[in-house]
Amino acid sequence: MYQCCIFDLDGTIINTIKSLTHTINLTLKTFGYPPIDEAHTKKFVGNGYEKFVERAFLYSGGKELVDRENVLEQYNLNFLEQCQYQIMPYDGIPELLELLKTKGIKIGILTNKDHNRAVECVEKVYGKGVFDQILGEGNGLKLKPDPSGVYLIAKQLSVPISDCLYFGDTNTDMETGKNAGVDTVGVTWGFRTKEELCAYHPKYIISHPSEIREVFE
C-alpha cells in the first residue's frame, strides 16, 4: 500500500498553461519576438524556466539568447506578476486529494517551477496546508529528472521510498520516477501525449483522477 503520493505541479494538479504562455509572450514581446501558442508552450516546458525561455526564443526566431541574463531576469519579473494568471485545478484532483488525506496518505509536490511561485500557485488553487510538502526550484536540489527531490520528500515525510507513488504528465516526470525507483502514474490531461508517457512504461496511465481511486479504496 502506498503511503505517499508525490505530484508534479504544472499539467498534473494545476492547469497553468495560460499563465506560462502569457508570461513567455510578454517576455518575447519585450525583446521584439513574436508570441508562441499554448501548444508550443506545452512542448517547451518541463525542464525548468531557463530551458523554457531558451526554447521559446529559438522557436520565435532568436538564433541564441545573446542577452541571456537580461532575458531571464525579464521573464522572472513577468512571472512574479503573472504566475497565477488564469490558473485552475484539473477536474477530479480536489476529490482525489481529499480521498488520500482521509486514508492518511501523505501528499507532496515536486516541481521544476520556482519554489516560491509554486507555493503561491498551490495556495491560491487549493489553500494553505493541504499538501504535506512542496519542493520547487531554488532549494539547492537538482532539477527533475534527477531523483533527489523524491528522496528528500520521502525522507521529510518519514515514508520508505518504496511506498511512494509519483504522478506526472511529461517524459521528465516519468524519468524522475524511474530514476528514483518508485512507481509512476502518467496523467494524460496535462501537457504531453499518452504516447510520450507510455514510452516510459509507468505503472499506471490515467485520463482522469477518478481512475486511480480504486488503488487506494
Image: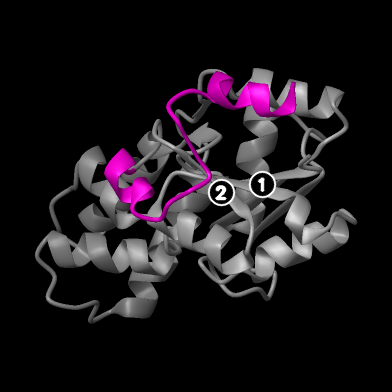
Q: Please give left or right for residue 173 compared with residue 164 in the image.
A: left
Where residue 210 sits: x, y (%)? 57, 19
Task: Name the residue at 13% across, 52% down.
Answer: 34
Q: Quote the CA–CA distance across marks 1 and 2.
A: 6 Å
Q: Which quadrant is home to the C terminus?
A: top right
Query: Residue 62: where, in percent of width, then height?
Result: 13, 70
Which quadrant of the rendered structure holds the N terminus?
A: top right
Total label count?
A: 2
Q: Is residue 193 above or below residue 158?
A: above
Label 1 amino acid? Answer: Leu
Disc 1, SS: strand
The residue beneath circle 2 is 184
Colouring chosen for the image of the structure: one colour
Q: Disc 1 or 2, which lies upstream in sequence?
A: 1
Badge 1 crowding class, 10 Å Cα cut-off, few under 14, some 14 to 19, many 20 or more, is: many
Query: Is residue 191 depicted above or below 43 in this figure?
Result: above
User: Would you identify the image quadrant in which residue 177 lies?
Assistant: bottom right
Magenta-colored span: 192-217
Which residue: 82% across, 36% down? 105
Q: Amino acid at mark 2?
A: Thr
Residue 167 belongs to magenta span: no
Residue of label 1: 165
* Residue 159 in which image quadrant: bottom right
Please indicate, yes or no, whether residue 193 appears anywhere in the rendered image: no
In terms of depth relative to the viewer, which is nearer, 76 or 176? Answer: 176
